[in-house]
Amino acid sequence: MGAPVTAAVERPLRADYAGPSETPFAGSTTRSHPSLNREAMGRIFETRKATMFARWDRMSKMFARIGKEITIAVKKGGPNPEANPALRRVIQNARAANMPKDKVESAIKKASGHDMAGYEEILYEGYGPHGVAILVEAATDNTVRTVGNIRHHFTKGGGNLSSSNSVAFQFKRMGVFRLNPAGVDAEALELDLIDAGLEELGESTGEKGDTQLLLRCAFADFGHVAKALEDRKITPLSSELEYIPQTPMHLPDDQANMVLKLVDSLEQDEDVQKVFHNLG
């Protein structure tokens, strides 16, 4: 399944659900590969993350998620980041999240042990209130517990857990890179990365209000773009595989907040890595 990610659509929402937003790079147009249909690819968007729970709780949850990603990466490719691109990517994301170096090293060492249990990666699909499509990426050592908890969150939040492939077709899985724009010539970078598989380049605003460059590529080109950035000595703020909604759904604020309350509940579950939805 790959490392989990959050897709989103730009939408003014109440302050209690404020989160990252996306705006097209260089004004009103989004840059995309010239051979692609610009109408289909033209808009860069990201769904906002629900932020009801406290900052320290979010940080603890993020560290736990990264810890699981480290375990999964080590189990698949070994503990040496130089020989394990997936682990190298997770370590970069850990740095961006300000995860202490000793915690990262401890997680790698622990994952290297033969008695360390692995995690099964599962994608759950469902609908939230008002028919909003939701995907839930989980990493678990107990699938019975996890599916029961996920179903409970959906039911309590006014939605329902659906069967496999009933929702995922509404999303496109893509590689997503966020860069610090300082010292980066975006137009030159775009031209350099097209051959590696770059499909979209836009401007993003991070959780702290900082400006970021957002790059997207097809799932199959994720490794190619990652290597192209590495060859150019550019270290992303984060690099993820995310499910991008193809048809955003727009709701009034009161109904949108019902959906985000469910998203928040799912994100706080210990087995959940990431939640994606098509709320516009």
Image (tube, helix red, strand yellow):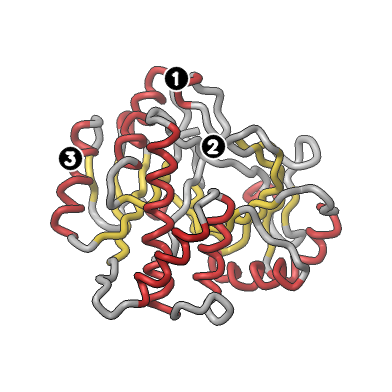
In the picture, the disc for residue 175 is none
Q: Give the residue number, with chain letter if any, for mark 1.
A: 252
Residue at mark 3: 152
Amino acid of disc 2: Val
**Horizontal arrangement in the rendering, residue 105 relative to residue 89 (left or right):** left
The answer to whether 49 is drawn above or below residue 79 in the figure is above
Structural crowding at the residue carrying mark 2, measured as other residues with C-alpha within 10 Å and reported as few (<14), some (14–19) or many (≥20): many
Amino acid on which the number 3 mark rests in the picture: His
* Mark 1 → mark 3, Cα distance in angstroms: 25 Å
SS type, badge 3: helix
| Image spot of residue 80 (x, y percent) | 51, 79
Gap in Å between the C-alphas at discs 1 and 2?
14 Å
SS for tag 2? loop
Reading the image, the residue beneath label 2 is 9
**Residue drawn at x 44%, y 80% as measured from the top left:** 78
At 24% from the left edge and 48% from the top edge, which residue is drawn? 162
Q: x, y (%) of residue 200? A: 68, 54
Q: Nearer the viewer, residue 174 or 233?
A: 233
The residue drawn where x is 18% and y is 60% is 143
Position of residue 249 in the picture relative to residue 38 (left or right): left
Residue at image x 28%, y 80%? 114
Q: Is residue 93 left or right of residue 28?
A: left
Q: Nearer the viewer, mark 3 or mark 2?
A: 3
Residue 26's x, y, as percent? 80, 40
> Callout 1: few (<14), some (14-19), or many (20+) C-alpha neighbours within 10 Å?
few
